[in-house]
Image (spheres, helix red, strand yellow):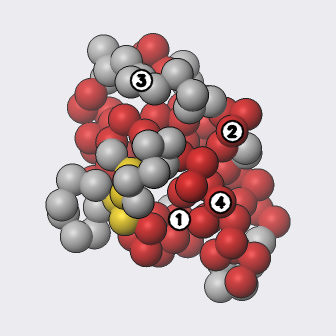
Amino acid sequence: MLIPTDSRISSARIGRWSTCLCFASLSSPAFGIQCGEKFDALDVNGSGVLEPEQLIPIIVELSHGHKWALTEEHVLSFTALFDVKQNNVIERDEFRERAAVT
């Protein structure tokens, strides 16, 4: 099982990911701002990129699952959906681009 490495990550900090997708036009400035806010909330170490374990809150929310039911394989598979540059981290531009099509 993959255990979150940072207890500061919570769905309360992330907000409802579905809200980002439902209430903003995908090409609007508001969507870009919301995605930036989600990215910043997930990037708890301030590195400017998201490591796979930092995506756990989104995976749990989208799957309506429980974080303890996730395996490392689940997280890495989901990460691969966003990791366009295939560098094992999600950069801000990848996050916004893939959020618009996910």
Q: Secondary structure at mark 1?
A: helix
- Disc 3 versus disc 2: distance between alpha carbons? 15 Å
Residues tagged 4 and 2 counted as in contact (Cβ below 8 A):
no
Q: Looking at the image, which residue is at 71% across and 60% down? A: 20
Which residue was labeled with disc 4? 37
Q: Secondary structure at mark 4?
A: helix
User: Who comes first in sequence, dot 4 or dot 3?
Assistant: 3
x, y (%) of residue 38? 61, 55
Q: Secondary structure at mark 2?
A: helix
- Disc 4 versus disc 3: distance between alpha carbons? 20 Å
User: Who comes first in sequence, dot 1 or dot 2?
Assistant: 2
- Disc 4 versus disc 2: distance between alpha carbons? 10 Å
The amino acid marked with disc number 1 is Ala
User: Who comes first in sequence, dot 1 or dot 4?
Assistant: 4
Whether 19 is drawn above or below 70: the answer is below
Which residue was labeled with disc 2? 13
Residue at the limit of the structure toward the front, as seen here? 46
